[in-house]
Image (cartoon, grey):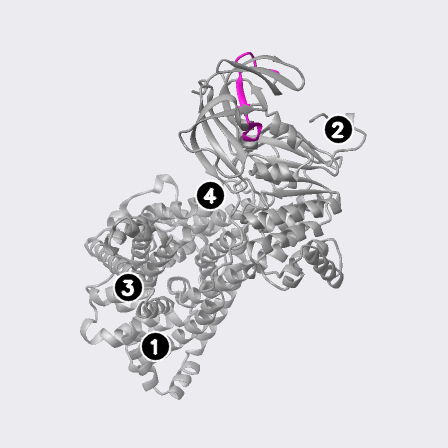
Amino acid sequence: MTGSGDGHGVAAALECRGLEVAYGRDPVLAALDLRVERHEVLALLGPSGSGKSTLLYTVAGFIHPRSGEIAIDGRVVASAHTRIPPELRNVGLVFQNYALWPHLAAVETVAYPLRRRGVGVAEANRRAIELLERMSIGHLSERRPAEMSGGEQQRVGVARALAADASLYLFDEPTAHLDTALRAQLQHELAERRRMLGAAAVYATHDAGEALAVADRVALLRDGRVVQTGPPVQVYEQPVDVWAARLTGPASVLEGEVHHADGACVVVTLSGRTVRVAGGRTADAGARPDLLVRPDWTALGGDLNGIVSQLWYRGPHTDYRLDTPAGDVDVRATGPPAATVGQRVGWGLRRVWAVRRPPTEPAPA
Amino acid sequence: MGFPLLELFSAAAAEGWTNAARSLVGSGAATPVVNTLWTGAVVTAVAVAGGTAAAMTTERSAAPGRRWLRLGLLLPLIIPSFVAALSWAQAYGPAGLLDDVLGLAVPGVFGPFGVVAVLVIEALPLAYLAVASGLASRAEPDLERAARASGATAGQVFVTVTLPLLRPALAGAAALVFVTTVNAFGAPAILGLPARFPTVTTRIYSDLAFAASPAAFSRAVTLSAALVVLTLAVVGPADAAGLGRGAVRTAVPAGGGFTGTGARWPGVVGWAYVAAATALPLLALVLMALTRAVGVAPTPANWTLAHFTEALDGRTVAALGRSLGLAAVAATAVVALGGLLTALRHRRVGRALSTAAILSFAVPGTALAVAMLLAYGPWLRDTVALIAVAYVAKFWALGHRTVAAAADGLPADLPRAARMSGADSLTAVRTVVVPLLRPALGAAWLAVFLFGLHELTMSSLLYGPGSRTLAVVILNLAQLGDPTVTSALAVMLTALLVALATPLLVVLTGKR
């Protein structure tokens, strides 16, 4: 997915080629390639410290890469010879900590980018109030940041970015400091806004559920490198390794053998029993790989055996941890607990994904 | 503390306010008042502008060696005002280093220009610290980045975001600089008095030290009271407007790597300033102390340590011991008081006392000394104890502010967690609060100790034959006009101060 721009008819909304960024001697981004198509939302999923914010700040123009090149809408904005200042990159940025100016009211904050583009005070304020109303906080237009809740502040931050009318939006974990309900609501609103705008966006987050929900494509970032990119379903169902699997959602790692795999099916042996299920394997998986199993790929009741070691009732569903000869496996089933801890149960497997076992790591017990 | 000030104002009132006003206007008191006011205004404008530029350079530009530049900018804080003035005279005055080497003497080093220049150099670090901490606490880099991302140029960001956010810091810096400048004594005494350029503080000093007439004493009292009123009139509103209000924190500063501008010239200008304002004068002072005699070329062939041995006679050593002892006593008493006030800070009496402490720091040293003479003079005149009492009263706030700020920064849940783990309240303080406050207590002690060694304003008014401090000895030597021995003593005092203060400054500047 990270081909050069030449092969495509239209220039990408964002293209990073061989990006290297370092703070002092510590490399933060290493040989990073990334492409975001027009109208596309790319989720940048990585743990804290993986370089998400650094990448966004580099694209926005606050950090100059040591080497490599950044092009926005086909225009090179950063390279060995070019350094376009942030205000000329036509990028909107939503900050993790909102970054609202304490001395300005909401309407002044949102009018700020318009004023910088030469719009008159009255017109800028009118459009700012319109934007605030679209974010359903029109009634807070005279409030300063100290007088607003976190969710309201971040809506002002989003409205300010929208006012910039950019061709590319960067979201730096915009919901990280919001509680769960607010987070879901803001995600929903951002998705609505995006459909209306049709602009491209890069959405950094460490929350797998959020990344899979908001994005057209997900890029997994680890230690400043892109480990995998693909549509949400692909990165969830076909992770490149155990690390990528754990980053994108809950996953159990089982010991087994792969005998045969075609496009959609795989034949595996688990503790002496051979089953044919949906799924597949990575190209480098080998004959004795790690078998990744998502909780939703399993079911209670089946011809495999296990003992319930722990269980968590979560309302709509119940999570069971089963102690099986092939290793611990997490099973998710709808409804209240159907078994008790210590009970022997049967379970079934619908799908499995095989990845190469890391040479240094011992096999899961 | 309250008692001496009460004495000061009742003495001033006893003169009668009409008399007082007449003595301010007539009998040559008008000139020092006018001089004090205009130098205060000029120094405030220049130092705040310079301090802001310096803060933007070290905090927001890619200037090379920014950490060292911070140290260089803060260096004048360590150097006593009278040493800075002496070193300027040695560097730029007639027969100074520049005169020797290039045949160039800056006109007016003795006089208004020199006084203003040295006062700016003394005040710039204060403005710099206030603005830099304002930048750190209120103008987080993300707020400026947000403006850049909204289409503002670097210049527009400074005008529309950075400056408005810094307004309280700038107001606080201006008030602090004005008060410090108006109360300054060392520079006007060394560079102003010989040129017949008196300020309020030096006039009070000459009235008390040289003129023994009752009229001179009552004029000194009136001028002191006027100085207190002026200082409190500036500090009060500034404290209410800007300093007391907590900053609105919207964002945690993001990780490093941010550089506002790629330009390197601000760093060059900064270094040039440090070199011209502090480094070259100090070099001139050292050379003067090392060179055989005045008028001889300051080359290694003419170097000698004779002035140092001459400087270290019995009286100087005794004065040095007295200074060290006074500073240590004041530091210990102030830290103890600071801890006590911090413990009481949530009670009404504690709050009232802490306001008193801050006010007493704002009261000019000259006026405080006159008040001490009026109140305790009958019993303690010419004793070291009188100076010690004055030091504790003056520096009380230094210890209190440092310790209270550190205590406020301590999450309240930490001692609570200790209580939940079975510690009683005293044990919680001893095992959790005190260990965490130890750096602040140490810093407060060291700061007061340094200020005590610096102190000239009060001790020059309070000393007697047996209670001269090292600073007073240096001042008297400078007035007798022996530049080589004066320089040698000043170099030794500065070396001692730098050695003691460097760890403090490194900690102060190393955080970011």
- As shown in the figure, which amino acid type bears the numbered disc 1? Ala
Q: Which of labels 4 and 1 is toward the front?
A: 4
Residue B491 appears in the picture as rendered: no
As shown in the figure, which amino acid type bears the numbered disc 3? Tyr
Tell me residue B52's x, y (percent): 53, 55
In this rendering, the answer to whether A217 lies above or below A116 is: above
- Based on the picture, tell me whether residue A312 belongs to the magenta stretch: no
Query: Would you identify the image quadrant in which residue A232 lies?
Result: top right
Rendered image: mark on residue B12:
none
Task: Say which residue label 1 marks.
Answer: B220
Q: Nearer the viewer, residue A177 or B365?
A: A177
Crowding at dot 2, Cα within 10 Å, few <14 / some 14-19 / many 20+, comes out as some
From the image, tell me which residue sits under label 3. B391
What is the C-alpha distance between the residues marked 2 and 4?
43 Å
Please report contact status of discs 3 and 4: CB closer than 8 Å, yes or no. no
Q: Secondary structure at mark 4?
A: helix
Q: Circle 2 sits on which residue?
A: A5
- Give the distance between the C-alpha atoms of the residues marked 3 and 4, in whole angstroms: 32 Å
Q: Position of residue B163 (x, y in %)?
A: 58, 58
Q: Are marks 3 and 4 on the same chain?
A: yes
> Which subunit holds the residue at mark 4?
B
Give the side of residue B465 with respect to residue A36, left or right: left
| Secondary structure under the numbered disc 2 in the rendered image | helix
Q: CA distance from mark 2 to mark 1?
A: 82 Å
Disc 2 and disc 1 on one polypeptide chain: no
The mark closer to the camera, 2 or 1, is 2
Which residue is tagged 4?
A: B67
The answer to whether marks 1 and 3 mark residues whose Cβ atoms lie closer than 8 Å is no
